[in-house]
Amino acid sequence: MTEAEILGQISTIVTRMLDDKGLPAPAITAETELLGGELKIDSLDLAMLVRELEDAIGHDPFAEGFIEFRTAGELAKLYVK
Amino acid sequence: MAGAFNLESDDDTPIVEYADRVLTRGELARRAEDLTTFARANDVQRMMVHSDDPLHILRAIDAAVRSQADLFIAHTNLPAAHINAIIETFAIGLVIGAEDALTGAPAGDAAPTGRIFMMTSGTTGAPKIAAHDVEALMRRAKAAITPNNRGAKWLLTYQPTGFAGVQVQLTAAASGGVIVAPAERSPAGFLQAARQSGVTQISATPTFWRSFLMTMRPGDLALRQVTLGGEAADQATLDRIRKAFPEARVTHIYASTEAGVVFSVHDGLEGFPAAWLDQSNQGAQLRVRDGFLHILAPNAMQSYVSDNAQPVLDDGWLATADRVELRGDRAFIVGRDDSTINVGGSKVYPLAIEQFLLQQTGVAEARVFGQPNPISGFLVAAEVVLDPGVDAAAARTAILAACREALASYQVPRVFKIVDAIAVRESGKKG
């Protein structure tokens, strides 16, 4: 999957999470900070996002330990092989 | 009586900083004195504080000490039925919060014992209630005072009514420090409060730290003390914290509601020195039996009022469910051997969540388990079998909405699957 496709996946998953909570989902770009306050998601939502990305993309970039990321784009890059 | 924190009513130094105002030690002293007078006038022997505001928690503790009453500290996310049952069972005469209210409960004939009762988070089942000796709590809080934290500002990251949250408030109050209460309990809200107040100490779970480090930028905060607790601290997280706060002392602690803080590790390495086993260290003794950590702690809580959670052995040691592995001269906590799920430092009992799911319309069977992930350690995962003919999409929406309504955020199944069947192992347990 390309970075843009993975970003699309992130956007789909986050939008569904916010929908589930009855919250508006702003457009997510590569620059969107995941926990920056703009998106009303918490660290457990983020944990869930990472799980679902692993299922969708087929590998876990955190298998060897945690890697720093802040924005949706930085997270997407981790899944590009 | 001087009260718990030696407050003076003319002291105008701050004790709690909110986003939009400051509570001074003097104002807290006056509020605590008023509460003490009110409690005495109404012959209140047992009171409850039901609020997340440090003002109400601290004045309740101070008033309980001054009037030698028992105090119950109740989580704000407990259903009203549980709160009312506790008030009735323990004959609680006064509920303290934004408005203080007499309950009219008869005082009962049990004399107050000057203890503080704290609750585990049992949103689904009735909460477990643990009795703590006020003196022991204050001793522990004062033991946490070091030259490093005099005049410090503490970010209140933990649930304010939980054991760790109360401990942070007591330590700040007893050491002349300031509690910083965020307007919003989210990573961005915590960072906002921390920057605005210039916090110097943050005590939080490794899960909190991982998301906090994602939110903050270098130079945002000048921390003197970083503390990790509630979950085992891993080396990657310890290293990232060290890099983000090169000036801070980084400590990870092993603590439980039952035993209090058992040990603190300051060398920045995960695990603890194996030499601490089978010798007295920091007042507590540790041993490993059959791969599990056992503790003999001087500041252990007195008892559970309700069911016991951790078995106390005949020789007085507390047997934990934490598995220990020895590698070289280091001991590591490698996991728990009971069914509890540690979600970012909060314990979830799968059985209670299963029972809740089974109460929902259309649910025939449910299994709840922990699913590992790199951010929060574990997440609550649920598999549900529906009754025949039930619409799966509608049921999913209704069940998740009911969970969000009735359960604490960390208890809500984040992984939710509707399945045809749930396997049952030979033991008869759901596998």
Image: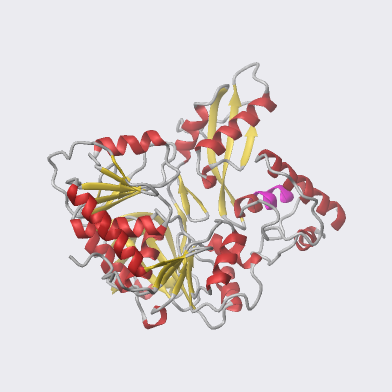
Q: Position of residue B373 (x, y in %)?
A: 61, 53
Counting from the top left corner in percent of width and height, residue B42 is at 19, 45
Q: Is residue B301 visible?
A: no
Residue B189 in the image: above or below residue B51: below
Task: Work out whether residue B238 or residue B295 is closer to the camera in this orientation and state it.
Answer: B238
Between B280 and B255, the residue placed more toward the observer is: B255
Looking at the rendered structure, the number of numbered marks drawn on it comes to 0
Work out which residue is located at the far top of the displayed protein and give it.
B389
Please give left or right for residue B334 compared with residue B321 in the image. Answer: right
What color scheme is it?
A: secondary structure
The structure residue drawn at horizontal position 22% and vertical position 64%, both measured from the top left corner, is B135
Q: Which residues are magenta?
A: A48-54
User: Is residue B187 a member of the stretch shown in magenta?
Assistant: no
Task: In the displayed orientation, state which residue is furthest to the front.
Answer: B10
* Of residues B391 and B41, the one drawn nearer to the viewer in this rendering: B41
- Looking at the image, residue B317 sits to the left or right of residue B147; the answer is left
- Counting from the top left corner in percent of width and height, residue B223 is at 52, 77
Asked whether the viewer can see residue B31, the reply is yes
Write down the quadrant of residue B211 in the picture.
bottom right
Residue B293: x and y in percent read 36, 60
**At x 16% / y 49%, what residue is drawn?**
B112
Q: Quadrant of residue B36?
A: bottom left
Which residue appears at 18% of the width and 49% of the height?
Answer: B41
Depicted B251 relative to depicted B112: above or below: below
Residue at 68 percent across and 21 percent down: it is B391
Q: Main secondary structure of the magenta part?
A: helix
Q: Quadrant of the C terminus of chain A?
A: bottom right
Using residue A56 as the reference point, say whether residue B431 is left or right of it.
Answer: left
